[in-house]
Structures are given as structure tokens and as C-alpha cells.
Amino acid sequence: MSTKILHKDQKYIDGLVQNNSFIIQAIYDRFVPKVINYIKNNSGSAAQAQDIIQDTLLVIYNQASEKKLQLTCPFEAYFFLLCKRKWLNELKKSDKKEVTISDEALFKSDDAQELVFETILFDKKQALFEAMFQKLGTACKDLLNTTFKIKSMEEVAASLGVSYAYARKKKSLCIGKLTKLVRESPIFKLLKY
């Protein structure tokens, strides 16, 4: 995607990452009503729509923070498609089949479809990582959580009350175990393609 031009709506992505209240309010004012209407017209409630919107904004925030998300399409198309996908997945889980898709609600932008696919894949990878992380023992989780917050291994070792050499070796073993859990998961095999 490096050859694609950054869309002017990148300001919404940047505003989310910076927790800019003006930009976040603009998202709610401009883009949220359409999502709420779509979900209400498709077997949902306003409360369910708010849950989908919050979840979608969190996924966008996480991807933008960790992977430097570059928007190459209008934010409205990207945001709406993500919310729509999440809502349709919710309907599938609950076996509700009544879905009304109006043509004006669909966005046919290839860039939006590509970004939505990347974001959904990112979200699934994050969920897999978190699920496998929870399978680690308490010592590994504490060590890795500390290394996520503190970058210096000397400080990590000091905060945990262990030697530097032990902290480095234990971190390596914990990452190895986490990597093995992720790679052995049936979900990982599906996410590779």
C-alpha cells in the first residue's frame, strides 16, 4: 500500500490515536448516525449499535497505534464497512437472518474493502495473541507485561526483583512459549492466508 496516496480523512485516524476530543466528536456527529440507522434497520437496537461502534473504534485505534494505519479511502467508507461487518458477524452468531442491505448504504471502494480486510485480520491476530497470552503462567505474564511497559531490561529486572540475566533468559523462554502457543493454534493456520 506504500504506492497509494494518503486520504485527507487520515485526520480521523490520527485524531483517534491522539485522543483528540474534537476529532472524536466529529466522528460521532458525522459517521455514527448512519451506522446506528443501519443496525436498527437490520434487527438491532441503538444500544447494540453503540457497542459495535465502540468496538470498531477500539480496533481502529489499536491498529493505528501499533501498525501506523494509513487511510487510502474516505473514513466514512472504511468505518461503515467495519461496523457493518461486525454487525453481520453478530447476527450470524445469534442466528438472526433478517438483514436489509440498501444500495445507498454500501460502499464499493476497493481501498475501503482492502483496509477493512486488513483491520479485521489485525483484530483477529490481536484476539489470538491475547487468548494465547492468557494461557501463559503467571510468572511469564507478569514478566511480559512489565517488558511491554518498561523497555529497559535492567529496569524490568529491578522492578521484578530478579537478576538481569534471569530476566533476559526468562523473557526469551516466555516469548518462545507464547510463539509456540500461537503457531499451534488452529486459528493461526487460518490467519496465515
Image (cartoon, rainbow, N blue to C red):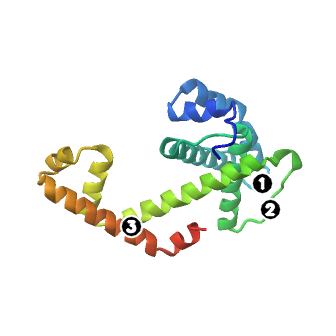
3 or 2: tag closer to the N-terminus: 2
Check contact, mark 3 vs mark 2: CB within 8 A: no
- Gap between marks 3 and 2 measured at Cα: 41 Å
Q: Residue furthest right?
A: 103
Name the secondary structure under disc 2.
Answer: loop
Q: Three-letter amino acid code at disc 1?
A: Asn
Please give the name of the residue rendered at 31% of the width and 44% of the height, measured from the top-left corner: 149
Q: Where residue 173 sits: x, y (%)?
A: 26, 66
Q: Three-letter amino acid code at disc 2?
A: Glu
Please give the name of the residue rendered at 69% of the width and 34% of the height, measured from the top-left corner: 7
Name the secondary structure under disc 1.
Answer: loop
- Residue 71 left/right relative to 20: right
- Gap between marks 1 and 3 measured at Cα: 40 Å
Numbered mark located on residue 42 in the image: 1
Give the residue number, with chain letter if any, for mark 3: 179
Q: Where residue 145 sits: x, y (%)?
A: 30, 52
Check contact, mark 2 vs mark 1: CB within 8 A: yes
Please give the name of the residue rendered at 32% of the width and 67% of the height, measured from the top-left corner: 176
Number of numbered discs on residues: 3
1 or 3: tag closer to the N-terminus: 1
2 or 1: tag closer to the N-terminus: 1
